[in-house]
Amino acid sequence: MVITDPVYFIALPLLTAFLLPLFGKIYKPLIGIIPGLVFAFLAYISFDLYLNLVPGKPIIIQMAGWAPPWGINLVFSEFSGLIVTLITFLAFLVWVYSYNFKKVGFDNSKKYFTLLMLMVAGSIGVVLTGDIFNMFVFLEITAIYSYGLTAFYKGRDSAEAAFKYLLLGSLSSVFILLAILLLYKQVGTLNMADIAVKAQSIDPKMKSIIAILFFVGLGIEAEMFPMNGWVPDAYSQAPGPVAASFAGMLAKSGIYALIRVFYTVLEVKGVFDLLLIMGLLTIIFAEFSAMRQKHLRRMLAYSSIGQMGLIMVAFSFNTKAGIFAGLFLMFNHAIIKTLLFLSSGFLTYSTKQKKIRDLDGFGKIMPFTSLMFGLGAFAIVGLPPFSGFWGKLNMLVATADSNLYFVIALILLVAVVEIVYYFKVIGRLYFRQQHKDVEVHNPTWNAILAMSILAIVIIGVGIYPDLITDYLTKATNELFDKAGYIHSVLPNLSLN
Amino acid sequence: MNSLVLLILIIAGGALLSYFGHKINKILGNITVFAVALIIPIYWFTQVDFTETVSFTVSGFHMELGYNMYGKLFSMIVMILSPLALIYAIGYMKDQKKLATFYFSFLFSILGMTGILMSRDFVSLFIFWEIMTWSSYLLVIFLGKDVQKTGIKYMVFSAIGAYAMLMAIVIIYKNTGSMMLSDYFGSFAGFTLQTKLLTGILLLLGFAVKSAVMPLHVWAPGAYSNTPMAYTSVFSGALSKMGIYGLGFVVVNLFAQANLEIVGYVLAWMGAITAVLATFSAVFQHDAKKLLAYSSIAQLGYIVTGIGIGTELSIMAGLYLAVLHAAFKGVLFMVVGAVERQAGTTDMNVVSGLARKMPFTFFTALIAIIALAGIPPLGGFVGKWMLYESLINNSNFLMVIMIFLSSTAAFLYCFKFLFGLFLGQQEPEFDHVKEASPVMIIPMLLLSVFLLVTGAYPGIVFKYVAEGMTNLGFHDVNWQMSVLTNAWGDSVNVQHVYLSVVVVFVAFLIFITWRGYKHSTKISTKDISSSGEMIKPEDNMTYAMDFYKPFQRVLQPILKWKINKYYEDFGKGLEALFDFMRRIYTGNGQTYAVYVIIFLAILLIFSKSIFGY
Amino acid sequence: MQEFLTYSIYGTAFFLMLLGLYAVLMKKNLVKIVIGLTVLDSGLNLLFVAVGYISGGTAPIFSPAVVGKHVIMTDPVPQALVLTAIVIGFGVTAVALALVVRLYRKHNTTNIDEIKNLKW
């Protein structure tokens, strides 16, 4: 491979995004094609880099030639690489899906792809960076373009959703920045590995305040209860593929930042117990709210929050089994929720009010889309032989490992609720008489392709989960091995 | 290639082929289904090597497939009943739409059941269990009736059961470090009492849901009667037996051997109560489907009682009844399906007197009803005999009375079923009714022949039951081909009973026919002369109308107590709670911001108790 | 005096932040909320600069005037960070105001309590 530099992950989409209008001036279809080429290229190099990664030796790039801890560095390790690969893969699929998404005209598609590429660049940056302030910057980049994407459609209540998101997102940025400020004041460095080394010397009182600020700030991004009011609005108002990329990328980078900070950078006692409690509350409130939703997209959004809660719970065990399960859940959530949002995009497109009860009998008039939705629903509630099952099983095994039997019971009881609302939709799709005068919008061939790829991944991993378990195990080891991370970023440092 | 893996692949492949076959064209699809229905049992009976095992490690879990004799017994039920039902379905589902989905789900549920019975570890057991659950769910809501109510109820109960099982599984994995069933059984004695009860009862819960034990039975009447009858015969005949399969090894291999017979005993009681209450409910149904559904629950109650008692004889009785129940309930649901298809309804207040129109159907129904009711010449009698004996041996006299009460009351609904559909006067509006097509009749006849044979030679079934029981720890179970013995030293040769009853019956039939032709005239229900009271033409004078009204009046207080209502109220309460909980998402962005600040403040205030500083 | 100055800067920063937070949480007008956000940001930026300041330090510029001498420089990193944060804050404010305009066009009001079509 010629190009082995992870810096392309950020530089390339940033550059092309701003050049995109110019390309459009030259030849209009370039607007649609260029992002695809960029995403394909990113997906390709991320797969290439990830598969050729030497265990225990992450690729570390120093920006502007300054070695860490002074310069900003990018870390492409087994863990961050996995998430980046996932993000680029999904970004490519989202492009395939929305390449000629009908509502997006030329002017709109210019904005759409520009914003989308910037959001992807931001999410990748959050995951790759090894510098805490840089992480903040990328979180903000992601957030700003997400506001834009949320408010993309003018006719709907999208501005309202975007404003709520913006309000909470700004608060989040204030808290993160404050936390970084306090942290910098204490340790005098911004490099995450360096902070991790020096963090032991911080006054515990101060450390807990920093941890709380990070927890709240990143919790907003990671859709944690009670700070997730923006999620259902943003997911339901954004265009279909954007909601999919929110679930697949935005939420992923949020939870990545959260766990990176608490696993690697700051070691605070008790934060994982807090994460467990908040994760459980997130699951409960989200799934219960999802149960009573009348709008399909809102239902999916709440369900997405519930999944994020589950991921938080998995990571809160602070054990290898827990991290492994959490990563598996992240993978599942990214793939399956993307499929659900993509298919629901066409389902709701054909209804007037986007309500669940408008979907009666759609299995007949939109067979492929309904099938994909049904498959996604089966997978997300954890029915075998789909990939969701293995995530759930690993999750429960990890829970049992930590002796938290009541958590198992709680998760499973909530899963029953989840089954109910998803199967209600399936029942309507397939076993009801359809309403009259439904305007059908059948998926375009590229949308079919994107959904099929996701479906194949879901079934493939469901039947043979060992396709990914090796990589997940490696990522788990990398995240769990804090000293290894510090050592590979700061090779000259003697740890004692 | 390993024959077990191949079996699974054949069924899965059959499912896909039937799916695409039916997508292309109906005839091609039906041919495929027919071929698959033949290939699966032929392959199973001739090619499958029951000593073979196959193991693989997936996602760090060691999984192993392999038959044991106990699983083989249940597999036989599946492998005989399901292909017959598939063939029956070709005729029964002829005019339905979405056949591709139907056969796909049908075959996948067969795949699930087959897999469950060959699983030697919990992961594959659970995987196949879930496959069975979702495929049967798709069939429950297939006709689009009561999708939200019945379908969701079925799914909720199945999910609760499955998740109870899953919880048990992960706790077991935590305690033994292995997913193998045998490791669990082996190390069960070493667990703490708490773990024993927790894992065992959770497993029991999972299996009890599928075998419709009260109070977890509420999904069953709706689900059984809502499903296309072609599948219900498998649903009630084979799928519910998966619960029995699990109950068997949990009660016997675990609790009985860990000196916790009390759990089995409680289960037996629940079975007995189920039997009584479900029988009473069955008596007053006027829809033949619902009647059979309740009757299924009641019959499963007997089986559960037999398994729960846990002695050699009682388990044998339970398993024997399980096999027979599959056969006669299979036939009966097919009969109802045939009636539904030919006459258009199964309401016994409407249909009557079909015996002449559908003689074969009537004949098979008669055989199955005799077997169900436990009237001597046929197999049901043997099973009940053994059940009573085992209960008496264990001095569970109260339970004997209950089972006896229930099986006596069962006569009532058996009688009502036969009369309501087949006997009585024939209504003019059913003149056009014809016998069902041979595709439907042949599976019913084959199963009836099996019932007739087991009447004289119950040993055919005992052989496999005894084999199966070796895996439950009962070796050298004593059985004879046609002779029943009891603990008091009496013995009865069933063949003699069989012959004498048949002779009497045939003689009686000849007598009746001879006399009947001389003296009877045919009248319809509309042709009635009244004494004083004027009969309006719209009055429903069908024979089965208000069949057991006096009896119903007596039982009113018992029947009024419906557990279903409590579940529904509970569900409504939960929904109200959910509605209340989601009010926190007020829609006001500022409120959300306030939440954030409050959350931050709470964390800062309690940081000492959370973080220690 | 120096001490007083430092603390007064800290005090001003916290005051600004609380003021901004008050506006965000209590004011019903969308524009005021956005202003609150900006004030909150400004307070934070001020705090950042204050933290980086070392009393008696010179500007952290590598010039001939300081080469080879022992001088105390203020910490340059927070200043760089503040620049970034200001830019981000500017971007967010711009987006926010654009959204306010659209909300006003749609709802004919800037009262946040009346803009809740999406709820529960």
Image: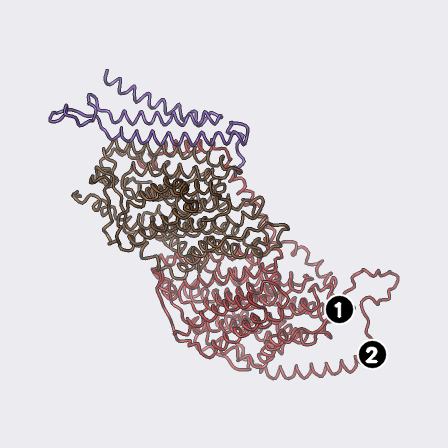
Chain colours: A brown, B red, C purple
B565 to the left or right of A479: right
Q: Nearer the viewer, residue A377 or B400?
A: A377
The quadrant in which residue B512 appears is bottom right
**Chain for disc number 2:** B
Mark 1 neighbour class, 10 Å CA radius: few under 14, some 14 to 19, many 20 or more: some
User: Could you tell me which secondary element the residue under label 1 belongs to?
Assistant: helix
Q: Sequence-wise, which precedes: disc 2 or disc 1? A: 1
A182 to the left or right of B411: left
The residue beneath circle 1 is B430
Is residue B308 in view from this perspective?
Answer: no
The quadrant in which residue A75 appears is top left
Callout 2 touching callout 1 (CB < 8 Å): no
Pick the quarter of the image with the N terminus of chain A: bottom left
Nearest-to-viewer mark from 2 and 1 = 1
Looking at the rendered structure, the kind of residue marked 1 is Phe
Q: Residue farthest to the right?
A: B532
Could you tell me which residue is drawn at 44 percent across and 65 percent down?
B256
In the rendered image, residue B233, in percent from the top left (x then y), is placed at 58, 68
User: Could you tell me which secondary element the residue under label 2 belongs to?
Assistant: helix
In the rendered image, residue A307, in percent from the top left (x then y), is placed at 43, 47
In the rendered image, residue A454, in percent from the top left (x then y), is placed at 43, 55
In the rendered image, residue A415, in percent from the top left (x then y), is placed at 47, 51
Pick the quarter of the image with the C terminus of chain A: top left
**Chain for disc number 1:** B
Q: Nearer the viewer, residue A308 or B102?
A: B102
Q: How far, Cα to Cα, is label 2 from label 1?
A: 24 Å
The residue beneath circle 2 is B519
Q: Residue farthest to the front?
A: A26
Mark 2 neighbour class, 10 Å CA radius: few under 14, some 14 to 19, many 20 or more: few
In the rendered view, tell whether residue B404 sits above or below residue B216.
Answer: below
Looking at the rendered structure, the kind of residue marked 2 is His
